[in-house]
Amino acid sequence: MNTDILSINENSLDRAAAIIERGGLVAFPTETVYGLGADALKSEAVKLIYAVKGRPSDNPLIAHVHKDYDISQLVENIPEYAKLLAKAFLPGPLTMVYNSRGVVCSEVSCGLNTLAIRVPSHEGAQRFLKRVNLPIAAPSANISKHVSPVTARHVYDDLCGKIELILDGGRCTGGIESTVLDCTGDVPCVLRSGLVTRDMIAQVAGECDVYMMKEGERVRSPGMKYKHYAPGCQTALYSFDRRLDALDEYRRRRAAGQRACIMCDCRTAADMEDAEILDLGSDERQIACNLYDKLREGEKLFDVIIAVAPEKQDGVMVGVMNRLTKACG
Ligand code: TXA
Ligand code: MG
């Protein structure tokens, strides 16, 4: 199969809509990462997502809708706090989990009685979702367990020959996947951290829990139990306090003839003397935005990426650390 990368315009949107209508897959940009979309009402189309990605069949998908879509068609028991959160943060990188009405096919939620809904803010995503006017089931558009894609080229590198069309909306500005928030209880509960932080949610909703898996418990967000975001080279991860140990490891690896690099923020880079650096930038938004791009750049150029965690660990860095630990830990 030929895989086309097309910028978003009326022609490419017509083509995308035709593919979705006949049960095919279209990769599209969002403000976080690229998604691999299918009609959430068509079982066979959704099954194709799992097959193409090699995704475990018990890891549920998010249904994406445009900003004027009435989600009460799909879900019920929307609590008051969720309405406030939707007003404050949508469209944007916040995915909200509700009780499902069972309208989308069961493969989307893997048989759970809940449904995760996301309204992306990316203009290209909105145009695509408006054009099809359907809930679009979409995971990140990478091969399962690989680093999520933040450019059309990244999608192509993983899915070339497996899908027909990648809508190109430029480089994603968010860089890590949306915050996933359980809105089925009395208090919202973060299942996956992201750019909309717990504090931001608590400010609007009054309170906000963060899900911690207890031993023996069934996971509430099945995706969290899998290894994820792994680049195709060796990795190591050091805390900020151990950054000089990272430099030692870098030197040992280099002395052994390996192509090694250090991935860190620009402040830490100043301590790394003449080491080869993958620079994540300075503030937390930049670091989130650069993380996957640098992991994908690094896996092509190096045998080993030695990552040093930034000193700051709160806010958006909670989500960044979660991804960094899974990728390099
Ligand atoms: O930013 C994003 O969320 C991107 C873009 C494409 O929108 N999508 C994305 O999808 O990251 P994916 O499939 O890679 O991650 C979906 C996450 C998983 O951790 C999954 O377990 C969780 O959402 N999830 C989906 N449905 C759920 C449900 N009904 N209950 C709890 N967690 C759910
Ligand atoms: Mg993913």
Image (spheres, rainbow, N blue to C red):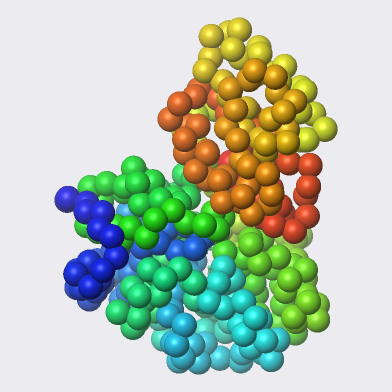
Q: Residue at coordinates 49% horizontally, 43% vertically from top-left? A: 293
Residue 43 position in % (x across, y down): 32, 73
**As drawn, 104 above or below 171:** below
Against 155, is 214 above or below? below
**Observer able to see residue 243:** yes
Q: Is residue 211 left or right of residue 300?
A: right
Residue situated in front as seen by the camera: 221 or 259: 259
Depicted 29 relative to depicted 305: above or below: below
Which residue is at a point 40% across and 75% down the rendered structure image? 126
Q: How many marks?
A: 0
Question: Residue sitting at 33 percent across and 73 percent down?
Answer: 128
User: In the rendered image, is residue 57 in sight?
Assistant: no
Work out whether residue 254 or residue 71 is closer to the camera in this orientation and state it: 254
Residue 87, percent from left and from top: 62, 85
Look at the image and tell me in which quarter the C terminus lies: top right
| Front position in the image: 145 or 94 | 94
| Left or right of 66 on screen, residue 289 | right
As drawn, is 294 to the left or to the right of 50? right
Q: In the rendered view, would you say 190 is above or below 5?
A: below
List x then y, in percent, for residue 39: 32, 74
Q: Kindly indicate the quadrant of the structure image that contains residue 46.
A: bottom left
Q: Residue at x 80, y 81 (%)?
A: 206
